[in-house]
Amino acid sequence: MTRHVVQFSTGLASAEIAWRLVDQHGPDDVLLLTADTRVEDEDNWRFARQIVDRLGCEWVILADGRTPMQVGRDLRVVPNNRMAVCSRVLKRELLRRWINEHCDPAETVIYLGFDWTEQHRIAAAVEPWKPYTVAAPLADPPYVSKPDLMDTFRARGIEPPRLYRYGFPHANCGGACVRGGQAQWELLLRVNRDRYLDWEDEEEKTRAFLGKDVAILRDRRGGTVKPLTLRAFRERLEAQPDLFDCDDWGACGCGVEQ
């Protein structure tokens, strides 16, 4: 008997994979495995509970107990796109320990929520996950987009997580992923100012703790790259709302080393 373990991020892609697997194999052979970073959007948890209620499969939630910025302070860095220690500690290592303790590589397939646009991430995940087999069903035809998946879940009677509706390309960390770029953080400031300010305060606390000029974002104006704090970025936007790189969405790489 094969055990089908889905890395369930509480987002659309992994939910769709779980749905397909339960359709193919039944709920008893499917397990959803979630790493709780303590900063996910509350509507993600509403969506996840509805998915699990409908599918009837086992759902395991793991938590280190710290937030991304707390991990950063413990490891003496401000988490960012180049040093996403939070995704390593709060997701990859946590998930891998549980799987090593509870799953047999000969009888387990690990499912990742990567789609057909993320072949590089799928390739990067194969070696680190050995001896386990990994699969990414959304990378295979027929190809589907995020809007397609949103329509699919609405047709099933389940409203997708609100972060997609707001315009975020993924629903990780409440829209505040440290690997995100200026466009992501500008969007967060517009749609959830309080959350942005919480992260701004956490970044300032970490900078003071480290005594270093470090930040999540980078300022590339004038051809020189330098740290751009969330506070400075917010103040810039409040003075000139269009003064940001609208193409800089950053990267999402929590599932693999990058």
Image (tube, rainbow, N blue to C red):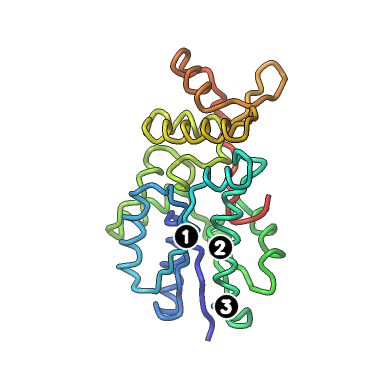
- Specify which label sits upstream in the sequence, 1 or 2: 1
Give the class, few, some or many, for how many residues have Cα within 10 Å of label 3's Cα (few <14, many ≥20): some
Give the class, few, some or many, for how many residues have Cα within 10 Å of label 1's Cα (few <14, many ≥20): some
Which residue occupies 42% across, 31% down? Answer: 197
Q: Position of residue 212 (x, y in %)?
A: 65, 30
Please say if the residues under marks 1 and 3 sit with CB atoms less than 8 Å apart: no
Which residue occupies 59% across, 47% down? Answer: 74
Q: Which residue is mark 3?
A: 108
Mark 2 lies on a secondary structure that is: helix
| Direction from residue 221 to residue 180 in the image, left or right | left
Residue 191 appears in the picture as rendered: no
Residue 77 appears in the picture as rendered: yes
Inter-mark Cα distance, 1 to 3: 22 Å
Closer to the camera: disc 2 or disc 3? 2
Inter-mark Cα distance, 2 to 3: 17 Å
Q: Position of residue 134 (x, y in %)?
A: 62, 68
Mark 1 lies on a secondary structure that is: loop
Which residue occupies 47% across, 52% down? Answer: 37
Inter-mark Cα distance, 1 to 2: 8 Å
Q: Amino acid at mark 1?
A: Ala
- Specify which label sits upstream in the sequence, 1 or 3: 1
Q: Is residue 150 above or below residue 235?
A: below
Give the class, few, some or many, for how many residues have Cα within 10 Å of label 2's Cα (few <14, many ≥20): some
Q: Quick one: 101 or 108, which is closer to the camera?
A: 101
Q: Which mark is residue 94?
A: 2
Q: Which mark is residue 63?
A: 1
Please say if the residues under marks 1 and 2 sit with CB atoms less than 8 Å apart: yes
Q: Quick one: 97 or 21, which is closer to the camera?
A: 97
Query: What is the count of numbered marks?
Result: 3
- Specify which label sits upstream in the sequence, 2 or 3: 2
